[in-house]
């Protein structure tokens, strides 16, 4: 079974600074997707960024980028130029690529606070 | 394009009662997945429906059941409610089951269920 671990329950960053959220996962699969989702107080889960395991290049989306280390099974999220609107719960998630097993396996989340 | 919607927003039930939660999938999506998110935890996969058939189930007892309708909307039914069923229930829709990156899951805002 796949597992996703987020070891940082809470993180804090000052506005305009950079913060990195950590995630490790365990799987025997070679082809899969990794995701970072943001869940603000409104509760709606919003996709931040996606990484395909077969791609060596790290994904980037504007101020958000990942450091994907496949051999180490590590997938961290870097948020640059942090904004007040970035404050939320962040969840790392895993999904197999093959077949019909398209369920997401989530970590326990990291609460990000952004201070002035 | 209409996003994923869920109803009701909040619900309070008594232990032993039954509850039905509803989800309308995003336009063009034929797959619906349900997740349970307990307080302070990441979402846990309950089950998935594809073209009106259950297609994969997580570690949840049979009193959790579902339906998908011809318009791809879905219901989650929980019988004999227990206190531990108190959680946020999230619905996510996608265009299909294949592992391609285009088959992203888009989440609704969730239903907060409280069992007393």
Image (cartoon, coloured by chain):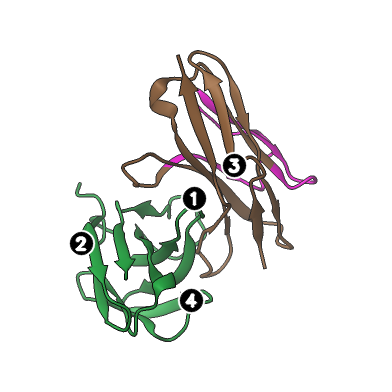
Chain colours: A brown, B green
Q: Name the residue under label 2.
A: B7
Q: Do labels 1 and 3 share a chain?
A: no
First of labels 1, 2 by sequence position: 2
Q: Tell me the tag on residue A9.
A: 3
First of labels 4, 1 by sequence position: 4
Q: Do labels 2 and 3 share a chain?
A: no
Q: Mark 3 lies on which chain?
A: A
Secondary structure, mark 4, is strand
**Dot 2, crowdedness within 10 Å: few (<14), some or many (≥20)?**
some
Q: Between tags 1 and 2, which lies in front?
A: 2
Q: Are marks 1 and 2 on the same chain?
A: yes
Q: Between tags 2 and 3, which lies in front?
A: 3
Q: Tell me the tag on residue A59.
A: none
Q: Name the residue under label 4.
A: B56
Separation (CA) of disc 4 from disc 1: 19 Å
Q: In this view, does A86 lie above or below B87?
A: above
Separation (CA) of disc 1 from disc 3: 29 Å
Q: In this view, does B108 lie above or below A111?
A: below
Q: In this view, does B106 lie above or below A1?
A: above
Q: Is residue A80 left or right of residue A27?
A: left
Q: Mark 4 lies on which chain?
A: B
Magenta span of residues: A47-74
Between B63 and A49, the one lying in front of the other is B63
Q: Mark 1 points at which residue?
A: B101
């Amino acid at each position: 079974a796949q597992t996703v671990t987020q070891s940082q329950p809470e993180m804090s960053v000052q506005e305009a600074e950079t913060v990195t959220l950590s995630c490790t996962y365990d799987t025997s699969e070679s082809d899969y997707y990794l995701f970072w989702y943001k869940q603000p107080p409104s509760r709606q889960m919003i996709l931040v960024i996606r990484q395909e395991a077969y791609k060596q290049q790290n994904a980037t989306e504007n101020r958000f980028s990942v450091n994907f280390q496949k051999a180490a099974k590590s997938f961290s999220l870097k948020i640059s130029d942090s904004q007040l609107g970035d404050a939320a719960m962040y969840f790392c998630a895993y999904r197999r690529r093959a077949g019909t097993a398209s369920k997401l396996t989530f970590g326990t989340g990291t609460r990000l606070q952004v201070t002035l | 394009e209409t996003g994923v919607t869920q109803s009701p927003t909040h619900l309070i039930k008594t232990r032993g009662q039954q509850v039905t939660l509803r989800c309308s999938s995003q336009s063009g999506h034929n797959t619906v997945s349900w997740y349970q998110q307990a307080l302070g935890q990441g979402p846990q996969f309950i089950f998935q429906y594809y073209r009106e058939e259950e297609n994969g189930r997580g570690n949840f007892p049979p009193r959790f059941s579902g339906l998908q309708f011809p318009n791809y909307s879905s219901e989650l039914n929980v019988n004999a409610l227990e206190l531990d069923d108190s959680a946020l229930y999230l619905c996510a829709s996608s265009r299909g089951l294949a592992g391609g990156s285009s088959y992203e899951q888009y989440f609704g805002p969730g239903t907060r269920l409280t069992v007393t």
